[in-house]
Image (spheres, rainbow, N blue to C red):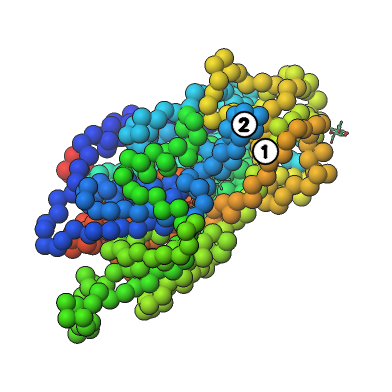
Amino acid sequence: MALRHLSVKTLFFLGLCQVGRRGFASSPEVREAPKKIAIIGGGIGGTAAGFFLRQEFGPAVKIDVFEAGTVGGRLATENIGGHEYETGGSVIHPLNLHMKHFLDKLSLSPRADVSSKVAIFDGKELTFEESDWFIVNFIRMLWRYGFNSIRMHMWVEGILDKFMRIYQYQQYGYSFSSVEKLLHAMGGDGFLTLFNQTLEEAMLAEGFSQVFLNDVVTPVTRVNYGQSVQISAFAGAVALAGADSGLWAVDGGNKMVCSGLLYHSKAELVPARATTISMKMRPSKTGTVHLEHYNSASNFYEVNYVGESGAAHSMYDIVVVATPLHQGMSDISFSGFSPPIPSHFPGRYHQTVATLVHGLLNVSYLGTTEKPEDFYVSEVLTLENKASEINSLSSLNPVKIPKGYSPSPASQRKVWKIFSSQPLSQQHLQQIFLSWDSVFEKRWLAYPSYSPPNRRTPPFILHDRLYYLNAVEWAASAMEMSAISARNLALLAHHRWYEQTDKINQEDLDTRLRGEL
Ligand SMILES: Cc1cc2nc3c(=O)[nH]c(=O)nc-3n(C[C@H](O)[C@H](O)[C@H](O)COP(=O)(O)OP(=O)(O)OC[C@H]3O[C@@H](n4cnc5c(N)ncnc54)[C@H](O)[C@@H]3O)c2cc1C
Ligand SMILES: *[C@@H]1O[C@H](CO)[C@@H](O)[C@H](O)[C@H]1NC(C)=O
Ligand SMILES: *[C@@H]1O[C@H](CO)[C@@H](O)[C@H](O)[C@H]1NC(C)=O
């Protein structure tokens, strides 16, 4: 289905982006450097924040990363029959430049490529099955949907072209104080509209047909966000880019990027759950608090946490919250802030259950008459209707591809992953599989439940020097989005600390920077 080609312009631009890092930012020494920074959460967002904060603030600052669970967060693997398989975030787009850069820095490599084949299932039968021949797929799509499919790639590419501007802005040290401002800097009012309308509204307005939306676009939003075309058009475009060709994963598992970043940034991992973040006034030399001379440098943040050895607390100059502040994701209370900061922001996270089954597929479940030994489909996407209770069914490759590995047909026992919004019953598994020897289930609160318009997006800045990385997920949730937010917050924290306001929320950066090139 994927037939996107990168423009030469884009590739050239990427080359430019990744040469000549800014190094430690020039800090006009009007103010002492911060001494201690806390990051709450050791997923890709928190560990990337550690990496970029180290880059901005230099080697002296102490950086602590609090992680209550496992480093990697929503990037996780499970061992099945001696091999590890991704259970959470799995694929990375070829134009995700921060993720690529991390791999280079950490001497990790992309996993070897294994060919894949897509089909679409309506709950009874396969309505589309990818052929090995590009031209056959192309003609089929053209026959059924006219130019919709070609135009879709152009539409997504147009959005991606604008999206790519963020890398240049960040390279020049520019940062943004809210999700809306970040989106506006990339794609102007057009991006804010995409953020505030449904994918369906946006695509119908662009002249795509309802049939195409139902048959082709919905299966993609279902596999990537577990939701329909009622998600925001911006998240939808990110989901559609996630159906491009050239997607990759990290050799050995995506979560290795997180542990690598943690190590590289020389941050200290604190294996504990942060419970409360409070604002405290720093007492003056005489031991009194001078309220009349109140300035932001005189307060600090106290992080209370519970680890294996009990409860403790530490003081920090800067804190980055890198976990969603939502029910079921984290329960951090904020004390001493005015206006108060809630533990949970409005909106909820969508449940996606990942069920990994090592077994034999019943190909008849898919309504196909093909013989299992000839059935090589590896990705089954689904239409939205009552008959399809699953969002997707895919054959997984291990995080490390063994030598001589090749895709096997459905007649062989292998690891399948099903995404569904509800856990699958034994009975349901019996319909899909002839037999199995292991079942692993992980219930994720995976990504926001998107329902535009967005009345209020959570802020990046919770308080003076207290930042919230996962606000970005309300634009779209992806590893790269967390990495972009991490870089943005490191720059923002730096500029606000040193009062370099000319690097925050600048308008018309695209035109201005084009002049500089
Ligand atoms: C099933 C699934 C499939 C996905 N597929 C893709 C994909 O193919 N491609 C893609 O790019 N993205 C995908 N995503 C999205 C991607 O995984 C997330 O956007 C990304 O991993 C979020 O990273 P994060 O660091 O911001 O948050 P998280 O990974 O959630 O990290 C937050 C961390 O904070 C910790 N924490 C929470 N509260 C506290 C506390 N009080 N104290 C200390 N620690 C705390 C948590 O334990 C967690 O480790 C998928 C997600 C899921 C669930
Ligand atoms: C395989 O699936 C088909 C169609 O759902 C069903 O009729 C058949 O009984 C299943 N086979 C087994 C062995 O369960
Ligand atoms: C989105 O729409 C809502 C309601 O119509 C409005 O309040 C909000 O300001 C809009 N947000 C953006 C970013 O345009």
Q: Quadrant of the C terminus?
A: top left
Q: Residue at x 42, y 41 (%)?
A: 259
Determine if the C-beta at disc 1 is less than 8 A from ligand 1: no
The type of residue carrying mark 2 is Leu
Q: Residues within 10 Å of mark 2 (few under 14, many from 20)?
A: some
Find residue 467 and report its image quarter: bottom left
Q: Residue at x 45, y 48 (%)?
A: 43
Q: Between 327 and 113, which is closer to the camera in this rendering? A: 327
Q: Between 258 and 216, which is closer to the camera in this rendering? A: 258
SS at badge 1: strand
Q: On the image, numbered disc 1 is attached to which residue?
A: 356
Q: Residues within 10 Å of mark 1 (few under 14, many from 20)?
A: many
Instruction: Give the farthest residue toward the left.
Output: 29
Determine if the C-beta at disc 2 is less than 8 A from ligand 1: no
Judge from the rendering whether residue 232 lies leftward or rightward of residue 413; answer left or right: left
SS at badge 2: loop
Structural distance between the alpha carbons of marks 1 and 2: 9 Å
The type of residue carrying mark 1 is Leu
Count how many numbered circles sit on residues in the image.
Answer: 2
Q: Residue at x 78, y 21 (%)?
A: 371
Give the mark nearer the N terminus: 1 vs 2: 1
Q: On the image, numbered disc 2 is attached to which residue?
A: 396
Asked if labels 2 and 1 touch by Cβ distance under 8 angstroms, the answer is: yes
Q: Is residue 357 visible?
A: yes
Judge from the rendering whether residue 315 lies leftward or rightward of residue 368; answer left or right: left
Figure quarter occupied by ligand 2? top right
Which mark is drawn over residue 70?
Answer: none
Please provide percent x and percent y for residue 4. Answer: 47, 31
Please provide percent x and percent y for residue 226. Answer: 62, 49
Find residue 191 and report its image quarter: bottom left
